[in-house]
């Protein structure tokens, strides 16, 4: 039995109430302000923040020669305002049709689908945010391994609170 | 091996301090099993076992020289490990720095 997943986990404390941090993720206008670091901008962010609702985000990188656009789409799997948000993310074209990362020139090993899990908690007006970004390796999007990964992540998150 | 199998093998192999020390040694250049065993208070067969794990994970390759079969570091599986997770960690860190700035600005505007 092999484990097909890898993940990134980042924890941050913000000097802001939990609702403000929640809005950073769920209000498209606020989301655009922070989601495009390192010379990227976010011209489009469409979010239907309900379970089963879709999202579509465009990231743009302008250089003197040309503008490079990358589109991402996904579905909200959990929406528990203001403490927990889970959504999937895949690369797509402007119409929202999913395309494989490899055909976009991403290196081998880049997963087709990733999932972003955000957990927020507030103490004395300050908010602790834990973000886990999980990947499913190409061709292994089997439910078994996937659920196992989520269970592991639950433990991972749980052990830190 | 598929990419994910390779990742599993690489992660499993890396989850051991002796094997990480062996890789650190090999980062400085190829070495024989005897040379690799030297810093450790461990039998040669025990070290050989660790080397086999690293070899199976594709993290090292061994020369064809029948007598010495020196070990060489192979960084390719590690590059697979580094690819998307490291990439994204970097991006998320930068994003959250910006989020902190946006939150700060919002607070200041509110306080005015």
Image: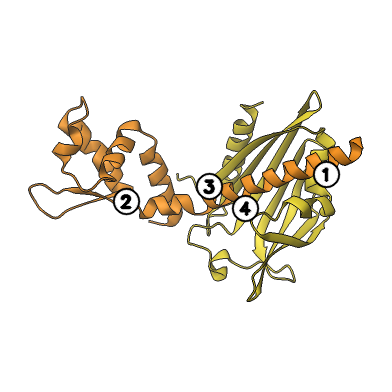
Chain colours: A yellow, B orange
For disc 2, the neighbor class at 10 Å (few under 14, some 14 to 19, many from 20) is: many
**Badge 3 is on which residue?**
A5
Q: Is residue B84 above or below residue A19?
A: below
Are dots 1 and 2 in contact, CB under 8 Å?
A: no
Q: Residue B58: which disc?
A: 2
* Residue beneath the point at 39% across and 45% down: B10
Most extreme residue toward the front is: B112
What secondary structure is found at the residue carrying circle 1?
helix
Tell me which numbered mark, 4 or 1, is placed earlier along the sequence.
1
Chain bearing mark 2:
B
Q: Is residue A67 left or right of residue B109?
A: left
Work out which quarter of the rendered image holds the C terminus of chain B and state it.
Answer: top right
Q: Nearer the viewer, residue B83 or B45?
A: B83
Label 1 and label 2: CA atoms lie apart by 45 Å
- Callouts 1 and 2 on one subunit: no
Q: Residue at x 53, y 49 (%)?
A: B85
In depth, the one of A90 and B34 nearer the eye is B34
Q: Nearer the viewer, mark 1 or mark 3?
A: 1
Secondary structure, mark 4, is strand
Secondary element at tag 3: strand
Alpha carbon of mark 4 to alpha carbon of mark 1: how far? Answer: 22 Å
Q: Which residue is mark 1?
A: A23
Residue B85 makes an appearance in the image: yes
Q: Chain of mark 4?
A: A
Confirm whether circles 2 and 3 share one chain: no
**Mark 2, secondary structure of its residue:** loop
Residue identified by numbered label 4: A114
Asked whether residue A57 appears in the rendered view, the answer is no
């Amino acid at each position: 039995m092999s484990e097909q997943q890898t993940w990134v986990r980042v924890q941050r404390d913000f000097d802001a109430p939990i609702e403000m941090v929640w809005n950073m993720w769920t209000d498209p206008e606020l989301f655009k302000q922070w989601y495009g670091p390192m010379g990227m901008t976010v011209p489009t962010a469409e979010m239907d923040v309900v379970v089963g609702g879709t999202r579509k985000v465009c990231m743009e990188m302008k250089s003197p020669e040309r503008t490079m656009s990358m589109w991402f789409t996904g579905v909200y799997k959990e929406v528990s305002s203001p403490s927990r948000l889970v959504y999937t993310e895949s690369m797509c074209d402007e119409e929202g049709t999913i395309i494989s990362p490899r055909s976009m020139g991403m290196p081998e090993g880049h997963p087709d689908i990733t999932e972003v899990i955000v957990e927020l908690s507030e103490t004395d007006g300050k908010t602790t945010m834990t973000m886990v970004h999980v990947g499913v390796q190409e061709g292994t999007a089997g439910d078994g391994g996937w659920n196992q990964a989520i269970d592991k992540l639950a433990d991972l998150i749980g052990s830190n609170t | 091996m598929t990419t994910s199998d390779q990742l599993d093998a690489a992660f499993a192999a890396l989850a051991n301090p002796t094997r990480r020390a062996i890789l650190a040694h090999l980062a400085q250049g190829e070495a024989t099993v005897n040379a690799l065993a030297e810093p450790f208070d461990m039998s040669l067969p025990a070290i050989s076992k660790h080397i086999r794990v690293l070899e199976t994970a594709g993290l090292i390759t061994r020369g064809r020289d029948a007598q010495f079969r020196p070990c060489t570091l192979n960084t390719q599986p590690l590059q697979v490990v580094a690819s998307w997770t490291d990439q994204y960690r970097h991006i998320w860190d930068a994003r959250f720095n910006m989020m902190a700035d946006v939150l700060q600005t919002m607070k200041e505007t509110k306080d005015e």
